[in-house]
Image: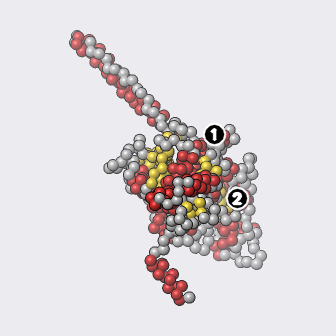
Amino acid sequence: EDLDSDGDGVITREEFEAFVAKVKAADGPGPAEVPEAADSAEASLKEAPRIQEGLAEVLSNGVRKDGKTEVFYNPAQVFNRDMSVVVLSAFAKLREEEALQKEQRRVQRIEERAQKRIENFEKQKEEAERKGDAEAAEAKAPKVPVLEPLPVQGLKILEALAATGIRTVRYAKELPAGRGGVASVVANDLDPSAVEHMKRNFAHNELDEDRFKAAQGCANAHMYARRAKGPGGVGNQAAYDVIDLDPYGTVSPFVDAAVQAIADGGLLCITSTDMPVLGGNHPETCFARYGGAALKAGYVHEMALRLVLHVFATAAARYGREVRPLLCCSIDFYVRLFIRVFDSPARAKRHASKTAVVHQCVQCESFFVQRFGEIEEGKEVKYKPAKVAVPVDFLQRCLRACSPEQMPNLPGVTSWKKINGLLTAMSEEHPDALYYKLPSLCKALKVNQVPLRQFRGTLVSLGYRVSHFHREPQAIKTDAPNEVVFDLLRLWAEEHRPVHCPLPEVLNKALTLQRPIEWKTEEKEAEKVAKFLPNPEPNWGPKPRARGAGGEKAQESPAKKQRGEAKKAAS
């Protein structure tokens, strides 16, 4: 009881040190008793269970009176961190290649200018000799500059909301140091006790103190103080190459600061777990956070990705920057986006042409996309609505990292099967906006279920592309017009008319497609990869929010406390 000063059932290191100072000041127990208490508390911290994830090990952050330990750790996010390690390994190599290409272009420009100066000097010398100007003819040739190649450093990373710092430890121990890897990581958290816990974790994992640092403060204030551009900016060379945002809930409060603090061409790693809001349960809250309202439709998971992408693209455009998505995934109970931010005022002006409104029919699955603007360059080029598409070259980099030959390079990753399945599903996904769910289409129109492979194969035979969505195997993601999709449903209804249910009026319309139409079955895959894996255990989802410094519970507001007391008195 003397050790647990705040009565929350958790004995922290700070409470123990305060107790020792109090005992020494009062000259209470004898000298033999205080070291015994110190040894007991130190032993309790050392004997507490540790969490092993990848190559990282996290210590306990406190010991309860009942002997239980409290570690703010969510096993459902292991896949998130595994995926981040794979993506950063590919991005570090891409960043290194881009830096080398930029350096080669710089050297080439300097050499070309030097060559032009030498050529001009030779011409002037010949002209001087022809005119008999001895002084000009004896002039020395310009010196050729000796080029020193600029050093190519690794990634400078900020984990803005670090908590235990396990993500930073994994980046440090599982990714190479320096070129093609990690140069430094700053792990920030607002909670002082979390920062102290991070420092203990860093020391326990023997991380270099000069390269891996724990910072205490507001994430937004930290990012605003290190803006890449504008007055007081640190410049692209000193700015962060990677900023990882993994908040408890929505990512919207950190959007504006993040798009300013990232370097030109840098990577934002974004997690947002407020899926009830992004899923359409609270459209007014969704509009306030993301500048758009989600629809309760079959494509809700893709719309959630597009809404998060939209709020970052809108914020970046204000500062003359353009957002380009690399990987955008809907996983379990959250969305995870990896996007790059580039300095490009000209392309930032095209933001309206990449933004659209979705018109969804309230009686069926039909929807239409209407973009806000259109840019025409010449007579041929047009800009269509935003595509949440994966650049093929970067996706192939990530898939190569999942090959059996490359897996040993990332020994801490344990979710290879799920990562490989997700990336393979994304590689087969077309960039068309949104999708239909075939079971929902048939149910709304009271039509017998159409075989998925037969429906998709027929669309392909008609000259349209079609794919699944990386989270929904029953999705019909196609560039076929709305009327073509419904024509196939009308044709199926004619051939497989329901017995006890009249067809809705929309299916009695004439087909716009030219008959005859032959049903085709989609070819089977040559090599099968498990793409849509189930959760590893029941109740797979987020854990309760962390309780804050020292483990104390959040205090109730006076109004809430007063209502509770009134309710208790009334009962």
List x then y, in percent, for residue 39: 58, 53
Q: Quadrant of the N terminus?
A: bottom right
Which residue occupies 74% across, 56% down?
521
**Quick check: 433 left or right of 539?**
left
Secondary structure under tag 1 reads: helix
Question: In terms of depth relative to the viewer, which is nearer, 69 or 498?
Answer: 69
**What's under tag 2, amino acid-wise?**
Pro
Which residue occupies 74% across, 62% down?
451
In the rendered image, is residue 165 in sight?
Answer: no
Residue corresponding to mark 2: 536
Which residue occupies 50% across, 83% down?
565
Q: Residues within 10 Å of mark 2 (few under 14, many from 20)?
A: few
List x then y, in percent, for residue 165: 54, 52
Residue corresponding to mark 1: 409
Q: Is residue 127 above or below residue 176?
A: above
Question: In terms of depth relative to the viewer, which is nearer, 424 or 112?
Answer: 424
Question: In terms of depth relative to the viewer, which is nearer, 544 or 96?
Answer: 544
List x then y, in percent, for residue 358: 52, 65
